Image: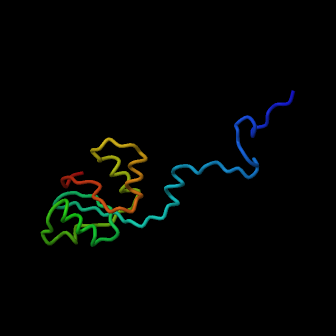
Amino acid sequence: MLRPSKVEKFGIKGNPKTHRPPKPFSQKLIERKMTMKFFEVNYPYYALIKAKDEDEALDMYVAFVADDDGTLREEIKEVDRDYALIMYGRYSTEDMSISTLVDDIQDDLPMVLLIGDTSV
């Protein structure tokens, strides 16, 4: 009796030579072109903000976190996506899944990701 081929055994449809398995989740994350930037402010209150540019991040900080005492432009700094993802996952007070965390980081909607005191 002949043994079933891997194609038959695992139910792979189409030509097994051209079949490509789905890309890993991490590769999808890397391949996506990011249009948003991430900004961190440490004083007077900590905030991690996702915005299109620094001016939008400053406006969001003033609207949702604290007033600008004149030093905000000096306090804000751009951080990379990986840092923002780690900080958001580590310090978020919401109980959310990994896919929700990644979706929040990847989507093109500006948002304040974290608000806290100066010692995060």
How is the protein colored in the picture? rainbow
Residue plotted at (37% across, 51% down): 86
Q: Is residue 115 above or below residue 94?
A: below
Residue shown at 27%/72% (left/top)?
Answer: 55
Q: Where 19 falls versus 111 (above or below)?
A: above
Towards the viewer: 58 or 12: 12
- Image quadrant of residue 76? bottom left
Is 67 left, or right, of 4 in this rendering? left
Residue at 35 percent across and 48 percent down: it is 89
Question: Is 22 positioned to the left or the right of 19 in the image?
Answer: left
Residue at x-position 53% and y-position 60%: 31
Q: 10 above or below 56?
A: above
Q: Residue furthest right?
A: 1
Pick the quarter of the image with the N terminus: top right
Q: Position of residue 93 (x, y in %)?
A: 27, 44
Quarter of the image holding residue 70?
A: bottom left
Horizontal placement of 76 versus 52: left or right? left
Q: Position of residue 8 (x, y in %)?
A: 75, 37
Residue 9: % across, % down: 73, 34
